[in-house]
Amino acid sequence: MDLPVTFRIYLPSCPEIASSFLSARLYDVSQEGLALFTDAIHSHSLHMFHPTATSAEQCLLEIRIPNGDEGLTLHGRVVWYDRIDTEGPYLFQVGVEVLDHPKDLRKQLETSVRDQPSASQSMEM
């Protein structure tokens, strides 16, 4: 899977305090969640994995996935991240547990991938 997405980092107790939207690539989906490639794991004082400096709570991600006119918005908690050691366009791999599972999440994501011209081409290779 190779789908461009955007995400922002926010505190569950203060959702109005959020980062700007950052870009990523969705590369894997499972029953429990999804995996992203990204260059950003923090924005200002909000870190997607570690508790923030001003609070003991872990931030959440709001992930926007293109899917027709409306798109798809998911909320999730980062359960792991790794720095990528090889050369490439991204610095990190991030595993996200999706907290608000739409009933047909996998089907919606497959439709999104199929509808993205660049994603369809990269899947055929």
Image (cartoon, rainbow, N blue to C red):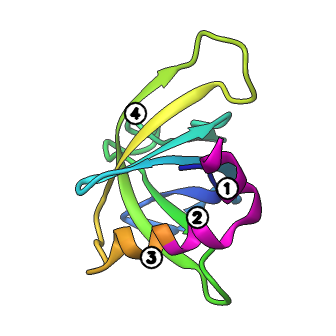
Q: Are marks 1 and 2 in contact (CB under 8 Å)?
A: yes
Q: Nearer the viewer, mark 1 or mark 4?
A: 1
Residue 65 seen from this side: no
Which residues make up the magenta segment? 111-125
Q: Residue at x 53, y 63 (%)?
A: 63
Q: Residue at x 59, y 68 (%)?
A: 114
The answer to whether residue 105 is left or right of residue 108 is left
For the residues labelled 3 and 2, the Cα–Cα distance comes to: 9 Å
Q: Nearer the viewer, mark 3 or mark 4?
A: 3
Mark number displayed over residue 93: none
Quadrant of res 100:
bottom left
Where is mark 2, residue-wise?
113
Q: As displayed, is residue 115 above or below residue 55?
A: below
Circle nearer the N terminus (4, 2): 4
Mark number displayed over residue 108: 3
Circle nearer the N terminus (1, 3): 3
Q: Residue at x 56, y 63 (%)?
A: 17
Residue 77 seen from this side: yes
Where is mark 1, residue-wise?
119
Where is mark 4, residue-wise?
50
